Structures are given as structure tokens and as C-alpha cells.
Image (cartoon, coloured by chain):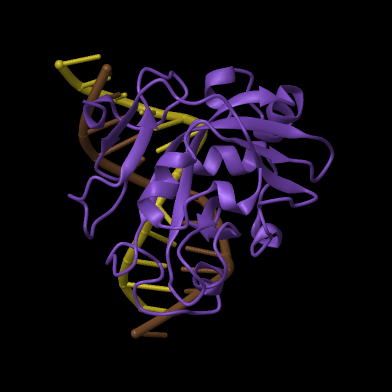
Chain colours: A purple, B brown, C yellow
Amino acid sequence: MTAGEFPVETVPLARALIGCVLVSDIANGRAAGRIVETEAYVPGDPASHAFRGPTGRTRTMFGEPLHAYVYVIYGRYHCFNVSSEPAGIGAGVLVRALEPLDGLAFMRERRGVDAERELCRGPGRLTQALALDRSVDGWNLVGGALVWLARGCAPARVGSSRRIGLSRAASRRLRYYERGNPFVSGPRNLSP
DNA sequence: AGGATGATCGTCT
DNA sequence: GACGATCATCCTC
């Protein structure tokens, strides 16, 4: 896919990414999954890492759109985001769940579990399954050599809800997911 | 099916 | 020093 096929604005991008395929060719083998759940972290958002301006960790949120922003959470997991908005504006889209498509053997090896549903359901799980870590931060995701976004099949219906795990700005409905897809994460009560 | 808990450390104040 | 855009595990219903 080309950069021009994606919206630059955060919320439209969060919706457009549903159904796209995320491919990782790094580490010891290719793994890929179809994005089924995202969250938007918009400009001026108190829940966004970019809220208080750029820091060493968050500088890629303020860079060009469609680049990877990867950070460590709780000292043990990674979360993968796609930067959004023009350079200078800090925003991004968190990828929360994938439907596994390719390289399931690699995913099982990296995750240490067998159940297909547990491979990429959750932001910390999918980064483990696709071997995405801090070294991926800043990479261009359109036309990238090792990690990139590809065309997928469009979602049937996209639902929205509050974002998960937040203490600030928790009431805003900036989470998007493919309705009825069993690989979507999160409590049922957030999927009306 | 759903709630509580502890692990664990990079990042920022 | 405090705090997480989480996960696995251990409970109770």
C-alpha cells in the first residue's frame, strides 16, 4: 500500500486500519495478522503519551505519520502504535488485536501458548507474537522492508467503545473494532 | 464469566 | 520515587 491510501488524521486512520494486514518479517520468520481492533490517541488527548509534549520515548509520535511508535509498558510488554497527523503534532493509533493470518508456528513459539485466540488478542500479546520491540520504533510502515502495512479484506461492521485501561479521558469512545470478530480483545461490556 | 492481584522496569517528575 | 494504553494466574459465583 502507499502512504496516500491512508488518512493522516488520527480517528479516520484508526478506523481505516481495521481490516489492514500488519506484516513482520523480523527475527526468525514472517508473521502477519489482520488488524481487528485499534484505539485513537488524538491531539490534545490527556490520555496520550504525547499530551505533555515530546520526550525521548515519544518523539516518534511527533514525527511523520505512518511510522511505528513502540513503547515498553509495565516493564515487561511492548505496545505497537502507528503515528498519525502531520509531523510536529503528537498523536497515534494503538493496535490492540490481530486476527492471525500467517506464521502461526512462529507466533506460538514466541508466545508460548497454543490457542489461536490467545496469540494476538491484546496489545502486549501481538507485539510478542510478531517480535515487535523498541528497536522497531521509528520505522516507516509503508513500504518498509521488515515491518509494513498491507491491504486486507474490509471489515463487515466497525463498532466503537471507550478505550481500555485508562484513568484519564476514559469516557471518550475512541476504540474501534470489527464487530463479531472473536479475535477482538477487551471485556464484552465494552462491545455494545 | 468476571473480579482481584502481583510481576517488573523504563520513563518522567 | 511513582506510575502505568498489560498479562497470567488465582480466586469466587
Which of C12/A110 is in front? A110
Q: Position of residue A15 (x, y in %)?
A: 40, 41
Classify C1 as above or below A141.
below
| Left or right: A177 in relation to A22 | left
Which of A14/A80 is in front? A14
Q: What residue is shown at x 53% (from left), y 25% (from top)?
A: A118
Q: Give the quadrant of the N terminus of chain A.
A: top right
Q: What residue is shown at x 81% (from left), y 45% (from top)?
A: A27
Q: Quadrant of residue A128?
A: top right
Q: What residue is shown at x 71% (from left), y 35% (from top)?
A: A110
Q: What residue is shown at x 53% (from left), y 20% (from top)?
A: A117
Q: How many marks?
A: 0
| Left or right: A188 in relation to A87 | left
Q: Position of residue A115 (x, y in %)?
A: 58, 17
Q: Residue furthest right?
A: A28
Which of A154/C13 is in front? A154
Q: Position of residue A125 (x, y in %)?
A: 55, 38
Classify A146 as above or below A112.
below
Q: Give the quadrant of the C terminus of chain A.
A: top left
